[in-house]
Image (tube, grey):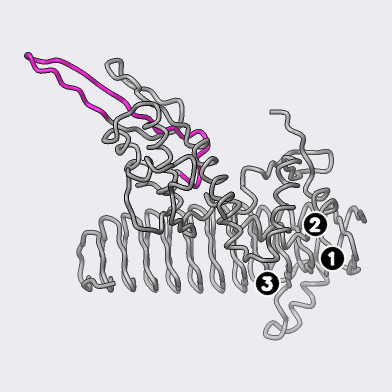
């Protein structure tokens, strides 16, 4: 985890932005909380950032904010910070969802960010051979919890299967599970499909940025 | 929003749901998540679920054990929120406690405000006493110090922190100043802003473009880029121009 870091004051000096801007962008979610790294130095506590990420993000914000409001920027650069602002009308255009993914949750228009991530999870499962009814379990689970797309780091959605036989009946249960790794299942259950939510969220975000 | 109104004036409990109005003037408990236009607590009210409302008024004792979302929250009594709060406009002249993070647009404190984690707003004004466990961040931070306030960090564009004006306190304030103690103080780890003006403030580090350190301040280090003014009755250990 030895990323190249840059001190906050050096960011301001290098980019010429003000404290006001930096804090405002942070409040809007344009600069993720996770990028603020507090470290003890000889002169006390200081805040550092991952150098490449912060510099390119500031560059993006500055080049886009001429035409767009900060809220629109959040939608483009960091939709997970404010999923409620996203309304997308054409999920099949996003490669991580695709036409097959859309069928898992049919709406005329106005898909929210959470729904898009949920669909991408479902589509991801479909592509590895999961049946639609089962993939739908994942979609419904992820969609129900907006907090998940806001902080997807380390979150996993998985589709499990449990079979048992009793008095001549054989029962197979499919279930979806959402949680932070490491997730554990009992011994009779097995994982049919596993989705890394952070990855999927990132894919959806990038795809949205491209179509915007 | 169509919904029924519910009013508890003796002692009672209702389940969560959608209401147009929830009034508690006796002692009441709401079990489950609530969505309402208006919530008024003038007695003792306890909400055991998340709350979403246009307007919440607490003049008695309100306790919220989960997340609260509102356009306006006015506290003149005592109001405790154990989860996060997302409130566009918060006015507290009573005692307001938030156990999680606070996000909003406008905050006005004239009583007491306690936020365990971060407080983020566009405008933060206080003439009361506040404590913020994490970062207090706003475009405009305007504080008139009354009592002893604290924050771990303050960051924003304009930061204006003043000792209370002495009119109603007569000579005692000027004397207090001479001794380096106003009637209110602020203790904070780090302050960062473009335009920073401080009085009666103790801080480890202050960073800014233009910085004015007024009477009664004790600052470990000031880092500034444009200008720095230090009052003779202030103490600054280290000054760094960048």
Residue at position x 25%, y 61% in the image: B17
Side (left or right) of B42 relative to B80: left
Residue A157 lies within the magenta run: yes
Side (left or right) of B223 relative to A112: right
First along the sequence among labels 3 and 1: 3
Q: Quick check: marks 1 and 2 in contact, CB under 8 Å?
A: yes
The stretch in magenta equals A149-174
Q: Nearer the viewer, residue B206 or B140?
A: B140
Up the image or down, A136 lies above or below B122; here it is above
Residue B222 is drawn in which quadrant? bottom right
- Sort mark 3 into few (<14), some (14-19) or many (20+) by Cα contacts within 10 Å: some
Question: Mark 3: which secondary structure?
Answer: strand
Residue B25 lies within the magenta run: no
Residue located beneath label 1 in the image: B211
- x, y (%) of residue B214? 83, 69
Q: Is residue A111 visible?
A: yes
Residue A2 is drawn in which quadrant? top right
First along the sequence among labels 1 and 2: 2
Residue located beneath label 2 in the image: B206
Q: Nearer the viewer, residue B109 or A157?
A: A157
Question: Mark 1: which secondary structure?
Answer: strand
Residue at position x 72%, y 40% in the image: A50
Residue at position x 49%, y 45% in the image: A94
Residue located beneath label 3 in the image: B142
Q: Are marks 3 and 2 on the same chain?
A: yes
Q: Quadrant of the N terminus of chain B?
A: bottom left
Distance from the alpha carbon under mark 3 to that under mark 2: 16 Å
């Amino acid at each position: 985890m030895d990323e190249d870091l840059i001190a906050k004051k050096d960011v301001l000096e290098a980019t010429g932005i003000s404290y006001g801007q930096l804090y405002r962008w942070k409040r809007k979610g344009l600069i993720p909380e996770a990028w603020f790294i507090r470290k003890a130095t000889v002169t006390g506590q200081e805040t550092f950032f991952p150098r490449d990420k912060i510099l390119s993000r500031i560059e993006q914000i500055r080049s886009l904010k001429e035409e767009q409001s900060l809220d629109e920027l959040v939608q483009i650069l960091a939709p997970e910070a404010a999923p409620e602002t996203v309304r997308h009308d054409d999920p099949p255009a996003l490669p991580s969802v695709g036409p097959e993914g859309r069928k898992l949750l049919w709406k005329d228009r106005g898909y929210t960010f959470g729904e898009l991530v949920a669909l991408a999870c479902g589509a991801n499962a479909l592509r590895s051979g999961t049946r639609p009814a089962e993939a739908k379990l994942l979609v419904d689970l992820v969609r129900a919890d907006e907090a998940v797309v806001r902080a997807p780091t380390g979150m996993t959605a998985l589709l499990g299967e449990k079979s048992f036989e009793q008095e001549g009946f054989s029962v197979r249960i499919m279930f979806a599970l959402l949680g932070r790794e490491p997730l554990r299942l009992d011994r009779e259950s097995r994982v049919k499909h596993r989705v890394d939510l952070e990855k999927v969220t990132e894919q959806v975000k990038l795809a949205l940025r491209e179509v915007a | 929003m169509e919904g029924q109104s519910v009013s508890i004036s003796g002692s009672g409990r209702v389940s969560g749901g959608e209401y147009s109005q929830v009034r508690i003037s006796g002692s009441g408990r709401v079990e489950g998540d609530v969505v309402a236009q208006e919530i008024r607590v003038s007695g003792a009210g306890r909400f055991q679920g998340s709350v979403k409302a246009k307007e919440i008024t607490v003049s008695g004792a309100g306790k919220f054990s989960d997340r609260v979302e509102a356009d306006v929250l006015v506290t003149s009594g005592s109001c405790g929120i154990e989860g996060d709060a997302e409130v566009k406009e918060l006015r507290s002249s009573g005692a307001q406690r938030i156990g999680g993070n606070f996000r909003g647009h406008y905050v006005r404190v004239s009583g007491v405000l306690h936020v365990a984690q971060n407080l983020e707003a566009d405008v933060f004004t206080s003439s009361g006493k506040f404590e913020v466990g994490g970062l207090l961040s706003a475009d405009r931070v305007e504080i008139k110090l009354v009592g002893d306030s604290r924050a771990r960090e303050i960051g924003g564009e304009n930061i204006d922190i003043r000792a209370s004006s002495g009119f109603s306190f007569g000579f005692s304030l000027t004397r207090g100043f001479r001794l380096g103690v106003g009637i209110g103080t602020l203790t904070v780890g780090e302050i960062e802003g473009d335009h920073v003006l401080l009085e009666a403030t103790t801080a480890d580090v202050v960073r800014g473009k233009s910085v004015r350190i007024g009477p009664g301040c004790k600052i470990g280090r000031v880092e500034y880029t444009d200008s720095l003014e230090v009052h003779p009755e202030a103490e600054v250990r280290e000054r760094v121009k960048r």
